[in-house]
Image: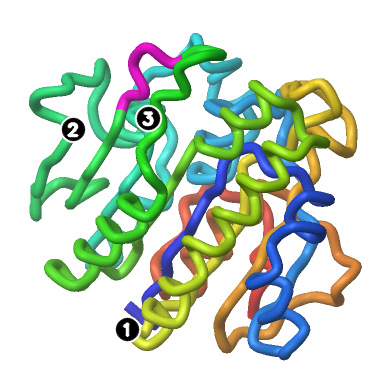
């Protein structure tokens, strides 16, 4: 691999909450140590559909995931499979949907919640959670410090070339309290504080880091449709590559080919969007 990269997806954070409430991320931008762009989700701007598009580089109309109730093993090549084809090692610490999309479906909590499979053609080292019992009262989300630490340990143990981390905490808080309230403001600030110590650690380990979300949320805690609050989020990049002007809007389909280009792995023929980093 040409370099190593970690993709950190904080589920369900609109552009305005990233730019207003994540003081550590914004501080690195102000100091010139990171860059930030607006990132626009596919339609429907629903979680599972976005997960599938981020890693396959194709629209929901092509990969077929129409929402969270329609999760299956995707047919398209994806970031994990392409990194493996290029000789790299992959890992993921994420919601179980990611395992179902890119490894095995249906998800077996005994077999799939934790595995190390060096010969697997997609995800070599998986640590997944189901959020079973999730609802408005019971969020059922793991501590984000635990997730960040787990990814870091996978990097240390297995020298991952590509690692994915996905957390639903802020999406769940937004659905419960909406995205313009004291509770969600505090949750965003706490996420920023918990994430911050890991970023310099990952950089020291030789990783480039992308922090973004799959989609935003509107005033009523909704997403899935077409509006700026639902579709638009931020994308922060820590690394040496050149990027577009700061007012550029990154299309979600650009993430897969961009990640692969940074790693030096072959893009799939179905990934037709261009890389936004050079």
Say what secondary structure mark 1 lies in: loop
> In the image, is residue 27 above or below residue 11?
below
Residue at the spot 44% in from the left edge and 16% down from the top edge: 134
Q: Could you say where residue 96 lies in the image, as x and y percent from the top left? A: 33, 29
Residue at the spot 44% in from the left edge and 45% down from the top edge: 166
Q: Is residue 133 magenta?
A: yes
**Residue identifier under label 3:** 101
Say what secondary structure mark 3 lies in: helix
Closer to us: 5 or 233: 233
**Residue identifier under label 1:** 205
First in sequence: mark 2 vs mark 3: 3
Say what secondary structure mark 2 lies in: loop
**Mark 1 Cα shell of 10 Å, populated few (<14), some (14-19), many (≥20):** some
Q: Is residue 111 magenta?
A: no
First in sequence: mark 1 vs mark 3: 3
**Mark 2 Cα shell of 10 Å, populated few (<14), some (14-19), many (≥20):** some
**Residue identifier under label 2:** 113
Please give the range of residues in magenta: 130-134
Q: Could you say where residue 277 lies in the image, as x and y percent from the top left? A: 65, 74
Question: Mark 2 to mark 3: distance in Å?
Answer: 14 Å
Q: Between label 1 and label 3, give the one nearer the viewer.
A: 1
Question: Mark 2 to mark 1: distance in Å?
Answer: 26 Å
């Amino acid at each position: 691999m040409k370099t190593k990269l970690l993709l950190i997806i904080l589920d369900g954070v609109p552009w305005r909450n990233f730019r207003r409430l994540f003081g550590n991320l914004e501080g690195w931008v102000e100091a010139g140590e990171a860059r930030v762009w607006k990132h626009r989700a596919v339609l429907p701007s629903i979680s599972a559909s976005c997960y599938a598009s981020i890693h396959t580089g194709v629209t929901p109309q092509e990969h077929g995931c129409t929402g969270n109730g329609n999760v299956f093993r995707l047919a398209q090549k994806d970031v994990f499979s392409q990194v493996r084809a290029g000789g790299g090692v992959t890992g993921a610490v994420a919601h179980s949907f990611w395992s179902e999309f890119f490894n095995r479906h249906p998800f077996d909590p005994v077999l799939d919640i934790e595995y190390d499979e060096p010969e697997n053609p997609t995800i070599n080292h998986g640590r997944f959670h189901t959020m079973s019992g999730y609802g408005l009262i019971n969020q059922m989300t793991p501590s984000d410090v635990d997730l960040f630490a787990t990814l870091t340990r996978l990097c240390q143990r297995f020298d991952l070339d590509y690692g994915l981390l996905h957390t639903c905490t802020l999406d769940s808080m937004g659905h419960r309290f909406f995205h313009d309230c004291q509770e969600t403001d505090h949750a965003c600030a706490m996420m920023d504080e918990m994430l911050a110590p890991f970023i310099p650690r990952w950089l020291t380990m030789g990783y480039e880091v992308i922090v973004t979300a799959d989609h935003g949320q509107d005033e009523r805690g909704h997403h899935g449709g077409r509006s700026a609050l639902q579709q638009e989020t931020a994308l922060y990049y820590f690394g040496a590559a050149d990027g577009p002007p700061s007012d550029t809007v990154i299309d979600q389909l650009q993430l897969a080919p961009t990640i692969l280009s940074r790693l030096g792995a072959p893009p799939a023929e179905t990934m037709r969007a261009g890389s936004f980093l050079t």
